Image (tube, rainbow, N blue to C red):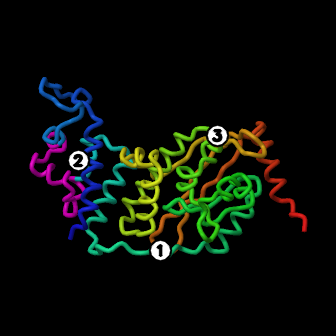
């Protein structure tokens, strides 16, 4: 059974956006003289995927629930999807087969004590656990010190829990905190897009996307691009209000917790012998010092 038209709309927009970015020359097809758009036509994608035009047109309209994995693979190759985009397409197909039509409240998985002990033992690195909605659900002392602008933001929820997406798009402080704010926006929107593919029935996720779409023109633009990011690793430049510029490498690790909810352990470290390491150590020493009573 296929889901609601909302799911079909996401499938349609995603496939159309991927089709539009491929030029005929990239796949060895003539451009022609009557082409109205730079990307591929539906019939051209159908030829590349080895299916009929009628069939691909139906697929792009969102009727994806009964499609085999082999056919999805062929479409993914024709559209030159990367690994994250391919996973997203398969997630959309899986979710379209689910019978439930009513968005529901997912109960957040509790972070077990052993994970909190692990976080607290990492005194030289900033480490936190992030769920698919980009809530920071647990963090060590250095994470709270490094990301103090986020923990102190007006965008934290009623439990005092930061949300990376709300901070990035809705708090002006984020413009200064992230040296490359545009890159942070792009990655954050793409992470949320991947989560929508995994959990389309998550009401809190839908509400978050709606809130950001209403309040942030930057988010609306990023969301319309339909970019997808499942794993986010690399280098990040932050401007901390207390210690200044820090350049950190960050690594995302899958963290199995009860239930289907996706959680990542994110660890930020500095290259040994650098000024950023000195500044991170300074933050660590401050976070380890008991507050005066």
Q: Nearer the viewer, residue 292 or 137?
A: 292
Q: Nearest to the eye among marks 1 and 2: give it.
A: 1
Q: Residue at x 26, y 74 (%)?
A: 99
Q: Quadrant of residue 260?
A: bottom left
Q: Are marks 1 and 2 in contact (CB under 8 Å)?
A: no
User: Is disc 3 surrounded by few (<14), some (14 to 19) or many (20+) residues within 10 Å?
Assistant: some
Which residue is depicted at the point 62% across and 71% down?
Answer: 159
| Residue drawn 71% across the image and 40% down it | 246
Q: Residues within 10 Å of mark 1 (few under 14, many from 20)?
A: few
Frontmost of labels 2 and 3 is 3
Q: Answer with mark 2 or mark 3, whichever residue precedes in sequence.
A: 2
Q: Residue furthest top?
A: 33
Pinpoint residue 266: horizontal percent, then vertical percent: 60, 55
Disc 3 marks which residue? 237
Please report whichever mark, 3 or 1, sits nearer to the chain's N-terminal start: 3
Residue 105 vertical position relative to residue 9 in the rendered view, above or below: below
Identify the residue position indicated by label 1 in the image. Answer: 259
In the rendered image, residue 268 lying in the magenta stretch gets the answer: no
Q: Is residue 189 left or right of residue 145?
A: left
Please tell me which residue is depicted at 48% across the width and 64% down the height of the picture: 262
**Circle 2 is placed at which residue position?**
74
179 to the left or right of 5: right
Disc 3/disc 1 C-alpha distance (Å): 34 Å
Query: What is the CA distance from the residue labelled 2 to the residue labelled 3?
Result: 39 Å
Towards the viewer: 48 or 21: 21
Mark positioned earlier in the residue sequence (1 or 2) = 2
Q: Secondary structure at mark 1?
A: loop
Provide residue 148's location: percent of width, then percent of height: 71, 54
Q: Position of residue 76 (x, y in %)?
A: 28, 47
Please report the bounds of the magenta region as a residue range.
46-71
Residue 54 colored magenta?
Answer: yes
């Amino acid at each position: 059974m296929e889901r609601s038209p909302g799911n079909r709309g996401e499938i349609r927009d995603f496939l159309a956006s991927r089709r539009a970015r491929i030029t005929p020359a990239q796949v060895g097809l003539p451009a022609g003289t009557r082409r109205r758009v730079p990307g591929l036509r539906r019939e051209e994608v159908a030829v590349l995927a080895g299916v009929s035009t009628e069939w691909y047109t139906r697929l792009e309209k969102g009727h994806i629930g009964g499609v085999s994995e082999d056919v999805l693979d062929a479409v993914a190759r024709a559209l030159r999807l990367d690994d994250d985009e391919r996973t997203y397409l398969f997630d959309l197909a899986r979710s379209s087969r689910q019978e439930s039509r009513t968005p529901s409240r997912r109960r957040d998985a509790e972070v077990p004590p052993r994970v909190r002990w692990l976080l607290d033992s990492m005194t030289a690195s900033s480490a936190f656990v992030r769920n698919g909605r980009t809530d920071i659900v647990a963090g060590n002392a250095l994470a709270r010190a490094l990301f103090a602008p986020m923990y102190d933001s007006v965008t934290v929820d009623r439990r005092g829990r930061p949300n990376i997406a709300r901070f990035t798009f809705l708090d002006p402080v984020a413009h200064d905190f992230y040296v490359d704010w545009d890159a942070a926006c792009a990655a954050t929107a793409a992470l949320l897009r991947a989560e929508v593919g995994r959990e389309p029935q998550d009401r809190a996720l839908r509400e978050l996307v709606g809130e950001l779409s209403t309040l942030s023109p930057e988010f609306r633009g990023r969301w319309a691009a339909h970019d997808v990011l499942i794993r986010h690793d690399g280098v990040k430049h932050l401007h901390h209000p207390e210690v200044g510029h820090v350049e950190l490498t960050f690594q995302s690790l899958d963290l199995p917790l009860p239930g289907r909810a996706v959680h990542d352990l994110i660890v930020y470290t500095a290259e040994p012998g650098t000024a950023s390491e000195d500044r991170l150590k300074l933050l660590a020493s401050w976070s380890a010092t008991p507050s005066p009573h």
